[in-house]
Every structure is written in structure tokens, then in C-alpha cells.
Image (spheres, helix red, strand yellow):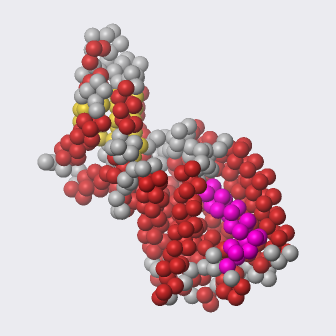
Amino acid sequence: MDIFRFLIFPGFLFAALVGLIFTWVDRKVTARLQWRVGPPFLQPFYDFGKLLVKEITLPEKGERFSFLSAPFFGLLATVLVAFILGLTITVPTRGFVGDLIVILYLLVIPALAVIVGGFASANPLASVGASREMKLIMGYELPFILAILVPVIKSDFSIQLNQILFFQQQHGANIWSLSGFIAFLVCLLVVQAKLSFPPFDIAEAETELMAGPYIEYSGALLALYRLTRAMLLFLLPLFLTILFFGGVSLSGCLLLPSILKILLVLVLIILIKNTNPRLRIDQGLRFFWVNCTLLSVLAILLAYLGL
Amino acid sequence: MANWKINALTRSLWVFHLSAASCNNCDIEILDLLTPRHDVERFGIVLTGSIRHADVMLITGIVNRKNVPRIKRLYEQAAKPILVVAVGTCACSGNMFRTSYQFAGPLDKIIPVDAYIPGCPPKPEAMIDGIVKLIGKLKGK
């Protein structure tokens, strides 16, 4: 049963399908914002299928093992996140103490896989991109963890996703309190950086680094990276929905508002992506370390005061 | 190529744009394809920055002695199958530079070319027509 859950329903296959559909939503909304028509509904699936039939090129001077294995580690961590978040929603009794912390760890691994793959490809542009990604991780992890402390404090210091959801069922969603709202804003910006969307697409800056760490990847390996990104595009809004919007429900008439909640977070991310130019790496670091960290400390203080 | 491979390829063509010492008019017209009026993302065509990701290599400009090794190198670096499209009269035939001492082309002397889109510069409509003909050629029509 758990194998089924891991591979098919809340796990790999389901998250991949929804993730690819969310990628289409992203591209379509972006196109409409630019007054274009945009790609057809199945376009992300076509792209994925096409990458699978292309040749896999290996860089001549690269480190073969890390280059080939990095995409798999990133995908594996993402599938685990999908499994844990999916269990929280489908089988609420199955959670374990500290699953919030496990998810925080697992969400770093896709970025680490990009860094390892970028450095292993022995391309100067990929190295620059990977080192920027590393700095960006150091920038956004601190405000992310601080902001996630707010729902934890509100639900009586419980580090279990079920308890946070249970608290929100009793007292209303976290977003409706002042501290919860500030923490949500910080988390939204961090998610922007985790997905490497503008203004934080510093690592893969397509106009200066072409594709950054991905530059030497082709064929099926690139498809794995893109699948990981697509799944994160679904899982990170889902994670924020669980923490701040009272989670999602799969039963009957509650299904539609649940989907709308996730789509609302997604469209917010897409709007920020399309209305902001890329920051330099020092500006990005300063933004996270000064503005976002101060905001999340303020949110923690407010949460202590019960606001 | 097998039939299903061609189907997969033609539905999402990622384009790498190489300007081999062109006067930039063709390049500007290529960018017109991505604007709201023509919007080739409707057909899944997007620009990529890395030749490793590309399915189509779009080459503009006069092929000269300086950039012949670079064109060959980029062609070798691409993940196969790769299609080559010569955009503009310069890349197709050499245009008014065909008698120049620097001229080392036209492009099909250097690498195999799958489609020619003549014009100085070609209109965006002509380029879309070229892509349609290229897809038709791949499918054997």
C-alpha cells in the first residue's frame, strides 16, 4: 500500500502529472500577461517526451558520476516531499513528529543536486551559476526557517503538519492573523527563489549565463531536472497552503476551494515572476538577509504576543 | 528516424540562435517571431540559451573564415537529432559578400542544412512558412 502511495497516488506519478499541468498554467498565464496566446495544454508533456528521445551528451572534462547521478537525487527528494505532503492530506493519522523539519531538509536537496550537477559539468558558466545558487540557498534558508516558525508557535510548538492543520481547523487559517500574513509573504518570496523564478533567477540568468548549471545537460537528464522543477511548482504552493491556508480537503464540495487555494498561491508566484526584473546576487542576498529576516523576526514576535 | 521520434520532436522545437557575423537584421526579425503578433510558442517553439538543449540550430549571417571552426564545433556539441536552418540570403548563398576574400560559405559547404529561408531579411511569415515546410519534410510529406 505504501509502495502504491509512494509511486502512484500522492507520490511520484500524481505529483508529476499535476506539476506538468501547473507548468502549463505558468506558461499560459505568462503568455496572457504578455498579450500572447501561449502554448497548448499538452505542451509540457510534449517537451518531456521530446527530451527523452534526444541524445544524452557528456562533457569531455566533467566528473561523470556526479554529472549523471545529481538529477536522480533531486528527483528522489522531491518525490519524498510529495509522499509526505500527500500522506498528510490523504491519511491525516499517518504523520510523525518532526515531518515539518524533514520536509525543510528535503526541499534543500533539489537545489543541492543542481549545484553538484553544475560543478560536475566543468563548464565555466555552469560553475558561476552553481556558485550563485549556493549563495542564494544561504540567503533564503534563514528567513524561510524563521517564517515557518510562526505556524509552529501558533499551534503550541508542534512540529507536525497534522497538528498545524488541526490547529487551523479549530482557530481559523494562519493567514488571517497579522503574524501569519507577514510569514506568508516571506515564504512566498522564498518559494520564488526556490523555484528560481525572477526576480531570483540569479543562478540560471538566461541572458548572461544562458542556462546556468543546466547548460551542459541534454536529453533525459535535462528532462529529470525539468520534472523536478515541475513537481516543486506543485509541491511548494501545496506546502504553503498547508501551513497558512488551512490545508486542502479531498472530500466532495471542499475539493474546489482547495484547488482554488493552491491555484491562488501559484498565480501570485507567476505574477511576481512576470513583474520583476532579475536582481544581482548581492542585492538578492541583502534582500533575504536584511528585509526578509527582519520581517520574519517581527512575525515571530507578533506570534508570541498572540497576534 | 522512427515515426514516433519525429512526432515527439516536431511538437516541441527548441531553437538555438547562432549569429555568424550577420548584420543583425535577420536576428531582429527572428525575435519578432516571439512577440504577441506571431507568438511561435503556440507551436511549442522557444528560444534556448544552450546548444545542448536545442533541436534546431538557426544560423544567420555570412559564414566567414573566422567563424567556420565555431559553427562546426557548435554543431558537434549539439545533442542529436539536430536540425539546421539557414536564415537570410547571406547564410543561404552569400548574397553580396559571395566574392569577398573572407567568405568561406555558403553554410551548406560547412554543415548539412535542412531548410533554407531566403530574404534580406526574411519576413517573420516567411520564417513560419520555412518551419512548416521543415516539419513537412521531416514527416515525409
Tell me where the magenta segment starts and ends, as one range.
A173-195
Quadrant placement of the C terminus of chain A = bottom right
The residue lying toward the viewer, choosing from B129 and B55, is: B129
* Vertical arrangement, residue A251 with respect to residue A82, above or below: below
Residue A176, position in %: x, y? Answer: 70, 75
Residue lying at 85% horizontally and 69% vertically, measured from the top left: A301
B118 in magenta: no
Q: Nearer the viewer, residue A68 or B100?
A: B100
Q: Is residue B67 above or below residue A255?
A: above
Farthest residue in the left direction?
B141
Determine whether A78 is above or below B98 in the image. below
> Is A187 colored magenta in this rendering?
yes
Task: Determine which quarter of the picture holds residue A149.
Answer: bottom right
A252 left or right of A156? left
Q: Is residue A164 left or right of residue B26?
A: right
- Would residue A270 be visible to someone looking at this image? yes
Mark count: 0
What residue sits 71% from the left and 57% below the top? A140
Residue A143 lies left or right of residue A274; in this view the side is right
Depth check: A198 or B79 in front? A198
State the residue at coordinates (38%, 45%).
B36
Location of residue A109 by image quarter: bottom right
Q: Quadrant of residue A246?
A: bottom right
Q: Position of residue B97 (x, y in %)?
A: 30, 14
Name which residue lies at 77% across and 78% down.
A154
Magenta part mainly helix, strand or loop?
helix
In percent of width and height, residue A201 lies at 59, 49
Q: Position of residue B105 (x, y in %)?
A: 29, 21
